[in-house]
Structure formats: C-alpha cells, structure tokens
Image (cartoon, rainbow, N blue to C red):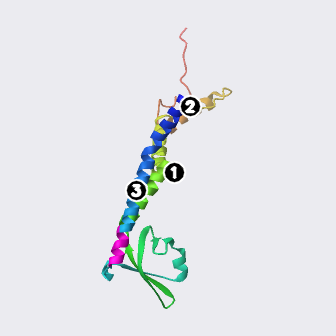
Amino acid sequence: MKNRILGILLIGLLVLPLVGTWMYLSHQKALLKKDVKKMIISGMDDDELELLVFTPAQAEKLKWKHSKEFEYKGQMYDVVRKENRNGCIYYWCWPDHEETALNNKIERVLAKLFGNDTSEKEKSQNIHRFYQSLYFSIIAIVDFSGYNMWQSLIYKDAENIGLGLCPEPPSPPPRMYNNS
C-alpha cells in the first residue's frame, strides 16, 4: 500500500510543474481577455485597429474562438466592429499580441506534457546522430578462396573510410633468392 502511494506521489511530482505552468498560463490568458474586453467597451480609436477584409467563404475558414475572436495567420484578433459591404465582410480588429504569445506558451507546455515537443525530439535525434558518428563498424565479408579478393577488399575499405592504413603492396611481390 505504501509503495502504491509513493508511486502516485512521484508521478504527481513529475507532472506537477507542467500542469502548474499550464494552469498559470490559462489564468493569465483569462485575465488578459478581461482587460481586452474592458478596452473594447471603453472605446478605441480606429488608428489602433487593423482592418481585415474577407469574403464570406474566407470568413468561415478562420479559426473562430467565439463570435468576437478569431485566429488568422497565427495571430489572435478581437473583433471591435464588423460591416458587410459589396459582398465582403470588413472587420475592425484589435491585434491581441499578448494572447497570441500566451497561446504559443500554452501549446509548448502541452507539447512537453504529452511528449509531442518537436524541438526536444530534434535535439534528441541530433544527439543520437552525434554519438553514432563517434563509432563506426566495418563489416567485411572475406572470401578465402582467392587471395586477391581479400587483399583488395581490405585495402579499398581502408581507403574508403579515410584510414589509409598502409599502401597497397607491390604487385607482383618481390622474389626471394636463396643463396644456398
């Protein structure tokens, strides 16, 4: 029973930092939305807003969070006012840079929490490739039926991997004279 409780406690301690960070960022996002809503209600000058024009088909394809907020090209926008003219929809929007940054942070935390963090996977793959490059193995299949094949296999492989262990022996080999 104690081991089970200890195991649950250890898992909780491992997950707590990421879950805590996600909760904190979600709370910050809620506070930020309240501030933006207050700014919109109090009124904004048109020079502070961005005008975005879409056809109805394009407007439907936007990532709408709700009727007054959408995401376009990775940026969050809060709709201050909207007009339909000449078959197009004109949105005067507040570009919400702070919420966009918080959304990106939340996505990174969730990716780490669920193991989908591409940057971490890429770092891990790079480290793995580095350690693989430190070691090399030459698998040579030696056919002892012909000496020339064995000789050329060894020397060519040594040259291919850049070792150049020793030069190829002279061909034909030197003759030995017996002075007896």
Say what amino acid the circle numbered 3 marks.
Answer: Leu
Foreground mark, 3 or 1?
A: 3
What are the residue bounds of the magenta stretch? Answer: 35-42
Q: Reply yes or no: does residue 40 show up in magenta.
A: yes
Mark identifier at residue 154: 2
Say what amino acid the circle numbered 1 marks.
Answer: Asn
Mark 2–mark 1 Cα distance, whole angstroms, equals 45 Å
For residue 83, which quarter of the picture? bottom left
Locate residue 31 relative to residue 115 in the image: left or right.
left
The residue lying toward the viewer, choosing from 133 and 41, is 41
| Circle 3: element type | helix
Residue 12 drawn above or below residue 48: above
**Image quadrant where one finds the C terminus:** top right
Residue 71 drawn above or below residue 45: above
- For the residues labelled 3 and 2, say whether their Cβ atoms are less than 8 Å apart: no
- Nearer-N-terminus badge (3/2): 3
Foreground mark, 2 or 1?
A: 1
Q: Reply yes or no: does residue 149 show up in magenta.
A: no
Residue under numbered circle 1:
116
Mark 3–mark 1 Cα distance, whole angstroms, equals 19 Å
- Nearer-N-terminus badge (2/1): 1
Which residue occupies 51% across, 39% down? 160
Callout 1: 10 Å neighbours few (<14), some, many (20+)? few
Mark 3–mark 2 Cα distance, whole angstroms, equals 62 Å
Residue under numbered circle 3:
25
For residue 73, which quarter of the picture? bottom left
Residue 143 visible in the current orientation = yes
